[in-house]
Amino acid sequence: MDKLNVSQVKRERSAKKHSVYLHIKQTVQSYPWNWPVLGMLPGVLVRLSRIDDIISVLEKNNLTFLLKGPWFAKMDMLFTVDPANIQHMLSSNFSNYNKGPEFKELIDVFGGSILIADGELWKNLRMSSQAILSRQGFQNMSMSVTTSKLKDVLLPLFSRFSEDGTILDLQEVFQRFMFDTTLVTTIGSDPQSLSTEMPELELAKALENAGEAIVFRHFIPRFMWKFQTWMGLGQATKLIDAGATFDRVCAKYILAKRKEIQEIDHHHDHPDGESEDVLTYFMNLDTSKYELLKPSDDKFLRDTIVASILAMRDTTSTALTWFFWLISENPYVEAKIRQEINTNLPKAESSQERSWSAIDRKDYLNKLVYLHGALFETMRLYPPIPFECTSPIKSDVLPSGHRIEANFSIIIPIYLMGRMKSIWGEDALQFKPERWISETGKLRHEPSSKFFVFNSGPRICPGKNLAMLVMKNVVVEILQNYDIKLVKGHKVKPKPRLVLQMKHGLRKHFGYLHIKQTLQSYHWNWPVLGMLPAVPLWLNRIDDLIWVIEKNNLTFLFKGPWFTRMDMLFTVDPANIHHMLSSNFSNYIKGPEFREIVDVFGNAMFNTEAELWRNLRMSTQVILSRQSFQNFSMSVTTSKIKDVLLPLLSRFSEEGTIVDLQDVFRRFMFNTTVVTTVVSDPQSLSTEMPEFELAKALEDAGEAIVIRHLIPRFVWKFQRWMRLGQEKKLIEAGATFDRVCAKYILAKREEIRAQEIDHHHDHSDEESEDLLTYFIKLDTSKYELLKPSDDKFLRDTILASIVAMRDTTSTALTWFFWLTSKNPHVEAKIRQEINTNLPKAESSQERPWSANDRKEYLNKLVYLHGALFETMRLYPPIPFERSSPIQSDVLPSGHRIEANFTIIIPIYLMGRMRSIWGEDAVEFKPERWISETGDLSLLPSSLHLTPVQEFVLVSI
Ligand code: HEM
């Protein structure tokens, strides 16, 4: 294997090990668009998986884009998301536009229903459908069917799953739920597809197969699928079979209904016509009003049943699935919805004193404005029907200026439309129910040509209001009883279908949402084992842990197993923190246990106390605050960026290599830290990505130390004595530290000696010396407890410097890039800030900057500063801090603590507390750091700066 291959393999291995991968890619402009013969098809295929790129193409083309298909394939299409075009085609010029013959042909299996029909037939179908959908009786029936299905089937099923700890696929649950309720409202009988057995139903299966085959037809030239149908091949067979199933199953329903009607006629026992099901309504239709409809014709009734299921089932169940996923990703939205539900809930319902009428329930649901906004917002981002087709009967010119011939295909990609910044603003990609709430707290109206999810004009969805009520009903019942969490690691993405369902991997019955009861039900404090058994449970459920701490007023006493000395007080209460780390500082130390746990690092500043700490702190502060040291560090960073990091990223980008950015940043910071500490550059960042013993030892030591925190002291003491497991690694890491540092120290002493002999040496340079030189030459009269001549002291100093700078900064950078890639609006704002403040000279590279110029420029980047703070608020590089009182004390929270008791401040959780940061605590919002005057907000006094914090931020 040659050298390059080796490095490639190493890189892949390291990428697997870590969890952050970012793909460096060129922008889409560089791909060729229009090919000879093949047209734009190859370009489209490349871009299909790059929704962002397609969005930017549409934005660049003023929201309308002409796609050239392969020559002679009749696949040219106009894509438009321009609200003006939509208003023109679907409202003001409605009579000149229809679904087009091609679309009808594509979905022929659904017959001539309302969803497909045009012209007079459509008008008849529309008027008759609207008549039944607008009946109070029909709406009430639909609501009661939904409510009883929820109470009698769905909730008991959830309870059972929750007790068993079963993970289930919520998409499938909602599909079955909607299938059952849709069939009850359509034909009056319940197929009971939702049950513990989850039986497979042929009609449901046929609908799925038909949907798949139809999508396939959209993507291949017409003559190909025509040929396949003729030969009965591939997808075509599925479609033919699905059609046959529709015929057979619907015939059965129709026959049964006819019998039922006859019997009722026979007994003269007419039920209330207002609440009849769809099939009964259409069978009894007054044909004098709707001349083109034929209630006696089984084909007409079959198409009506299929259309009714299609219109109601998948649309609603899909919207519900995306909704639950989005709120599980946005817990603050979920909290707001729960609050709205509880605030508006009438007393009677909560105490279950009386059952509600459908009308009471409707009134209540209509009050839930924020929930309404959250459902609209879900469908804006994940519209159940992701695209719409239309075609002009006569040639026309669109408001966008595009001239289109008769029968030309026009596609409205609704999915993309909801993501356009020019339509929805800079935050288009964010899930923000607030955008639907007006200043007076009412629902904000958006024209249907803009919020096109329910179509627009005369063909607007006639079931919209009913669908909203049904969805609200489902959400309220579920949220009142359950917490729903996404199973960790499950990938969520849409699958291209007629209805925008969620693609959840290949495994069919693989679930993705975990239903669980609220935390109260867990067994907490066990005899002998204390709370230890609950720990693994919490560790996977950070949200619960946050909730427990919030419930306990930010301070929580953890009981470890008996006799293990593992009891600890967890606190994130800013008042306690201020007390321990500031006002009562002298009574608090890291504690002997902590020192013992991190003994491999020796006497570093972060694990010493009292006078020794004061000496270390003062001497360190002197060098860190030197202008020259700061400038030295800045130039090291800058040249490492320009000479190493950027060329490497360019190369990866050209090769299309996927890099582990965490590894890159760690190596980058390792190099710059070692340079500022001892001056010699280990060059760990290069195409070869060599492994370094010092870096490796630091990693092993870190791992072992975490384990020491989690297990009882006697266990790791015993392991150390036996040289077992992670303790063995720790001993080896210690030896590596000794050896490598001894080398650095020896080299540095020699260098200093040589300089002292060399009389030409200019001492004015002293100001920009590295850390090791500084400590070797330290003035011991000022710092009596420090011993520059002692190699052990220098070794500990080198290590402390690397530990303090390397991982903290590189970790913050890695999370920062991940968060900005997930929040493109933040990235855009940062880029803008960078460009706006960039001095002309730099951009044209006319003159090199001094470190001072650069510092001044970086200090202007307030929004970037906020984004970095925000990154560290959510992902603090040091996730917890430890403290212990020398003498017993009472904390401001009222907790009495004995001397030497362990107190943990879980900084990671602290950044996620709603009671500290507000309802949007878990959101990434750099804006929270910007004051009204555009400056950086002052930190709350409970959060304390470390001496290097500002320095580190400037380096970043
Ligand atoms: C979240 C739920 C729903 C969404 C997003 C939705 C969306 C839509 C859209 C986009 C169309 C136009 C389709 C086209 O012309 O290609 C449509 C049509 C239609 N929808 Fe809905 N719908 C939903 C629920 C329902 C429900 C619950 C019903 C019935 C109770 C219903 C009944 C209909 C009917 C009958 C049409 C055909 C209208 C026509 O062509 O004139 N929809 N819907």
Image (cartoon, grey):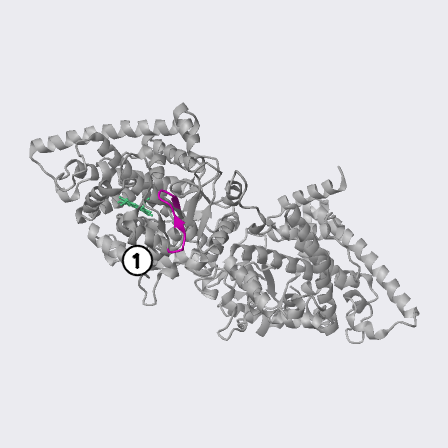
Magenta run includes residue 361 = no
Front-most of 426 and 918?
Answer: 426
Which residue is labeled 1 in the image?
368
- Look at the numbered disc 1 and give the secondary structure of its residue: loop
- For the N terminus, the image quarter is top right
Magenta run includes residue 401 = yes
Q: Is residue 707 left or right of residue 913?
A: right
**What residue do we see at 44% from left, 27% from top?**
234
Quadrant observed for ligand 1 in the rendered image: top left
Numbered-mark total: 1
Front-most of 58 and 660?
Answer: 58
Q: Main secondary structure of the magenta part?
A: loop
Q: Position of residue 358 (x, y in %)?
A: 21, 50
**What residue do we see at 19% from left, 28% from top?**
255
Front-most of 708 and 717?
Answer: 708
Front-most of 292 and 809?
Answer: 292
Image: magenta residue range: 399-410
Q: Is residue 881 visible?
A: yes
- For the C terminus, the image quarter is bottom right
Three-letter amino acid code at disc 1? Answer: Leu
